[in-house]
Amino acid sequence: MKRNTIIQGDKSLWGILTLLVIFSFLPVFSASSNLVYVIGKGTTWGYLFKHLLLMSFGFVLMFIVHRIPYHYFKGISILALPVVILLLIYTNSQETIIQGANASRWIEIPIVGLSFQTSSLAGLILIIYVAHFLDKKKFKYIKLKSSFFSLWIPIFLIISLILPSNFSTAALMFLITIILLFIGGYPVKRIISMLILAFTFLIFFVLTSKAYPELIPNRVDTWISRIESFKNGHDLESNYQIEKAKTAIASGGVLGLGAGKSVMKNFLPQSSSDFIYAIIIEEFGLIGGLGIIILYLLLLFRIVVIAHKSKKFFGKLIVIGLGIPVVIQAFVNIGVALQILPVTGQNLPLISSGGTAAWITCISFGIILSVSSCRDEIHDDLVDNKENNNPIAILSETA
């Protein structure tokens, strides 16, 4: 029997997501003063209002998506896959070059004055597509020849289009895809062979781009400098960021300086996004920093619980595929601020000030909530939709 409540799905997950977003307004409002000082326009209240609009619309998207039976996304992923590939090609064709490197990550939306990060949407669609492929092939022997064009070509194509401008996102996306394939029962030998192929391609790409930088604008030098900086601190820009982040963390102590009283926000680049965790510790201390970590661990716990309770193989896969990357991204961001990892440019999900990438995160959790709301139901919706000739439902079943 279907539930009649307006808000469905895992109530604990709703609560954790709400707590993260509500808390985000304090550090974003505080750190946005740095943007006002550096850019020289706008006000802290303006940036806070923008963050409020972005996160409010994100929750609206989450609410709408969580009411959609998650089976529909099988068909949607098939239809959207060629669209996101074209979007990535268009994004790269803009040739946004910063210091000789390809920085084409966003598409401008002139009507609303926002930029859209196409790699975030591509990652969402790719994960759902891979989960759908594995769901179709469950309990079947999968041959590499039969899956190469239908599975690996889309994976390699999307990752390759993201790689030149955003290595960390491409690496994270490829990692979660491999994890999903392993969980989904794809033959381990074939995964290893594809990993060797991917590694060979990466080496070839790096060597070619170093030899012919004018032909392939990329961020290879940036990747290398960040890794070297992490090892020996030679890169002045990255080292400056880390030193200011460490100073902010050391200043926080146990209880912090208090909300809005951060000093390093005026000196730390990307204090409202990439290094917002350092500002959180400076203002809220060790207790605030541990509180954020606990919330993300609780988020991981609910993701595992929802995946475990889902009665459908496809549901289990998309919960893992869409939920785990958010947690990994969070701890990568925290690891960068604590100098455990090299600088990657990954935001703190649902807390950092950002743009449309936050909407993709909300859509991802909307799908996860849809899975959690359907876990105890016998899914008669697809049968009803077939009888009503719903094209997306039919495509989801027959694809």
Image (cartoon, grey):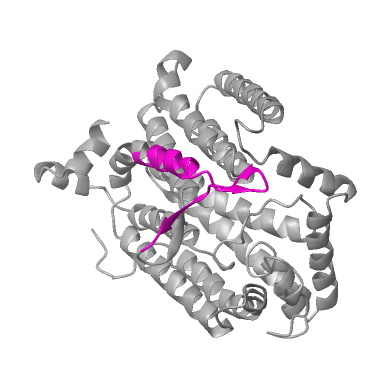
Q: Residue placed at 70% from the left, 67% from the top?
A: 277
306 w.r.t. 249: above or below: above
Q: Residue placed at 40% from the left, 56% from the top?
A: 372
- Give 246 or 63, whichever is nearer the viewer: 246
- Give 313 or 142, whichever is nearer the viewer: 142
Most distant residue in the front direction = 214
- Give the residues drawn in magenta, as a range: 83-110
- Give 92 or 291, whichever is nearer the viewer: 92
x%, y% of residue 251? 84, 76
Q: Visible in this render: residue 102?
A: yes
Q: Residue placed at 35% from the left, 36% from the top?
A: 82
Q: Visible in this render: residue 140?
A: no
Q: Residue placed at 38% from the left, 52% from the top?
A: 371
x%, y% of residue 394? 19, 38
Numbered disc total: 0
Residue 102 within the magenta-colored segment of the rendering: yes
107 w.r.t. 35: above or below: above
- Report the side of 148 relative to 25 (left or right): left
x%, y% of residue 203? 69, 25
Q: Quadrant of residue 249?
A: bottom right
Residue 123 within the magenta-colored segment of the rendering: no
Q: Quadrant of residue 122?
A: top left
206 w.r.t. 52: above or below: above
User: Which quadrant would the N terminus be assigned to in this image?
Assistant: bottom left
x%, y% of residue 323? 51, 52
